[in-house]
Image: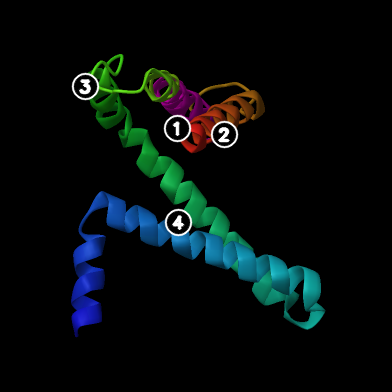
Amino acid sequence: KILLNGLASALESYRGRDRLIRTLGYCCQLVGGVLVEQCPARSEVGTRLLVVSAQLSHCRTVLRLFDDLAMFVYTKQYGLGSEEKDVFVRWLSVLGNVADQLYYPCEHVAWAADAKVLRMDSARWWTLSTALWGFSLLLGVAR
């Protein structure tokens, strides 16, 4: 009962849902990939798990369409990090915020191109959004 209530409570928040969707997606991707590569008799199950993983990833992409305002408010509040004591940490954080601010619109354009809302090839936009995401992760690790 406690576990069920905890799960229900977590799913009531955006972060809780995102964590569950991300965890399930990565688990499906891992198990599906192993089954497809290592167990030919179970490759159909593996393929289905990979499809579920792709759908969960798409779900997270669609949900991120609504993250822009929250990210903008966070970035605006942080500003140039004047309250940060360490100058190195401050500038890593500012650069990370810039990368995050650019990431969202690039991902939105890629998504819109895939959804045929925009008539363009999405590949460059996905590459750019992935590069910005990776850059942001590296800055976070360095920070």
First of labels 1, 3 by sequence position: 3
- Which residue is at 20% across, 59% downward? 12
Whether residue 111 appears in magenta in the rendering, the answer is: yes
Name the chief secondary structure element in magenta.
helix
The quadrant of the picture occupied by the N terminus is: bottom left
Element under label 1? loop
Note whether residue 8 is visible: yes
First of labels 4, 2 by sequence position: 4
First of labels 1, 2 by sequence position: 2
Query: Residue 88's quadrant in the figure?
Result: top left
**Distance in Å between CA atoms under marks 3 and 4:** 27 Å
The residue that disc 3 covers is 77
**Distance in Å between CA atoms under marks 1 and 2:** 14 Å
Element under label 2? helix
The amino acid beneath tag 2 is Gly
The amino acid beneath tag 1 is Arg
Residues at badges 1 and 2 in contact (C-beta under 8 Å)?
Answer: no
First of labels 3, 2 by sequence position: 3
Note whether residue 48 is visible: no
Residue 40 located left or right of residue 49: right
Most foreground residue, 120 or 23: 23
Mark identifier at residue 143: 1
Which is in the foreground here, disc 1 or disc 3?
A: 1
The residue that disc 4 covers is 22
Residue at the extreme front: 85
State which region is magenta: 96-116
Crowding around mark 1 (Cα neighbors within 10 Å: few <14, some 14 to 19, many 20+) is: few
Residues at badges 3 and 2 in contact (C-beta under 8 Å)?
Answer: no
The residue that disc 2 covers is 134
Q: Is residue 75 above or below residue 33?
A: above
